[in-house]
């Protein structure tokens, strides 16, 4: 956010005031501002603001977690390294770590000896705390925003809240999510196609397409665990209803556009 | 007459350039285009000021300060 003097007489100095609310930041924050003026040589002037938002702790690799649980072949867990901020007094003691989802489990381990950097985490130092978030049980499909919270035992931020974005691939993903048939061809046939992707944990089962009576459905491979499904229908209007895609006991229903 | 025509044309073409040279324009100089607000406790609002000096002969107008 910026406020400014709109008029600056010749030879005078005006002010442009920049404000950054650090509530949603942790660590270094860099922001740009573009000043628009009537100086013909510099109609736009770039400005930069830097601030260090210091809390009780520093979080690595970053101040949020992006977790894609391994059901789709992604990571099986995600780690967060918590380090006491050098400017903070007291001693970091992580207490009561929890995530607001029953299908996520978080554990905390205090680092006793230096540990080498792993993946995107820096070298861990004694006194740091390593938080590990894992998916447990039945994990809902789709994208969700959760929160990881823990106590620090430190004065500036007794409690720290970390955003956690969790994305779980659907077991059967159909694109598009509505089947729309094209215009009738010369012989009256209408056609539609869909791309179906099976998650690895259901891909051992064959893909079965259940279409309304009279509708033809064929499929061919479009790569690993992916299929092109071609649908055809001969009639004045598409029949409506839905098409069911099945892999083993898992089904996904997709509506037919009217 | 043939000699006067090129002379008149030259004067016409030179006139706008001469006017432009004498035209007063603003000239903006930001004395501190990079502002380091240092370290603040997370959750606080950090605030700082850029100083914009007008070194031109006409009034400088700032139309907008757009973040990003």
Image: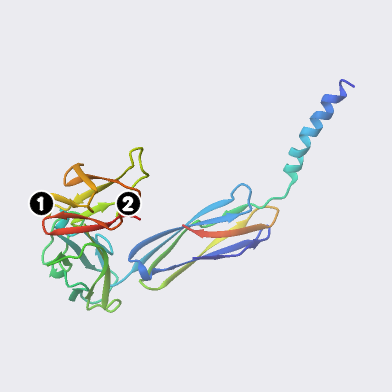
Percent position (x, y) of residue A82? 21, 67
The quadrant in which residue A122 appears is bottom left
In this rendered view, identify the residue nearer to me: A71 or A211. A211
Name the residue beneath numbered marker 2.
A238
Image position of B19 with respect to A127: above or below: above
Instruction: Report the disc number at residue A242.
Output: none
From mark 2 to mark 1, how far is it between C-alphas? 29 Å
Task: Tell me where residue A225 appears, x and y as whole percent.
Answer: 16, 47
Identify the residue at image location x=70%, y=54%: B58
Read off the chain for label 2. Answer: A
For label 2, the SS is loop
Which-is-in-front pick, marks 2 and 1? Answer: 2
**Res B64 → quadrant:** bottom right
Residue topped by disc 1: A205
- Which residue corresponds to the image point at 61% horizontal and 64% vertical from the top-left? A5
x, y (%) of residue A34? Answer: 52, 55
State if disc 1 and disc 2 touch (CB < 8 Å).
no
């Amino acid at each position: 956010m910026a406020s400014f003097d709109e008029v600056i007489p010749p030879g005078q100095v005006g002010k442009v005031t920049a404000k950054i609310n650090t509530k949603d930041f942790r660590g270094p924050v860099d922001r740009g501002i573009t000043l628009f003026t009537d100086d013909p040589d510099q109609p736009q002037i770039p400005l930069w603001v830097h601030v260090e938002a210091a809390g009780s702790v520093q979080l690595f690799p970053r101040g949020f977690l992006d977790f894609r649980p391994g059901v789709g072949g992604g990571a099986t867990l995600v780690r967060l390294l918590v380090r006491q901020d050098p400017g903070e007094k007291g001693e970091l003691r992580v207490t009561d770590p929890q995530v607001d989802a029953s299908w996520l489990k978080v554990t905390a381990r205090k680092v006793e000896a230096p540990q080498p950097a792993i993946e995107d985490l820096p070298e861990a130092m004694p006194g740091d705390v390593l938080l590990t978030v894992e998916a447990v049980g039945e994990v809902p499909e789709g994208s969700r925003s959760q929160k990881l919270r823990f106590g620090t035992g430190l004065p500036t931020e007794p409690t720290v809240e970390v955003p956690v974005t969790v994305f779980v691939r659907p077991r059967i993903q159909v694109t598009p999510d509505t089947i729309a048939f094209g215009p009738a061809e010369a012989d009256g046939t209408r056609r539609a196609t869909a791309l179906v992707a099976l998650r690895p944990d259901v891909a051992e089962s064959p893909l079965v397409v259940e279409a309304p009576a009279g509708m033809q459905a064929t499929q061919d491979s479009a790569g690993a665990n992916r299929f092109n499904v071609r649908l055809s229908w001969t009639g004045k209007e598409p029949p409506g209803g839905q098409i069911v895609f099945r892999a083993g006991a898992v089904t996904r229903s997709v509506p037919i556009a009217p | 007459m043939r000699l006067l025509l090129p002379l008149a044309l030259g004067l016409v073409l030179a006139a706008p350039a001469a006017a432009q040279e004498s035209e007063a324009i603003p000239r903006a100089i930001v004395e501190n285009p990079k502002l380091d607000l240092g370290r603040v406790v997370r959750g606080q609002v950090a605030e700082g000021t850029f100083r914009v000096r007008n070194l031109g002969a006409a009034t400088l107008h700032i139309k907008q300060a757009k973040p990003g």
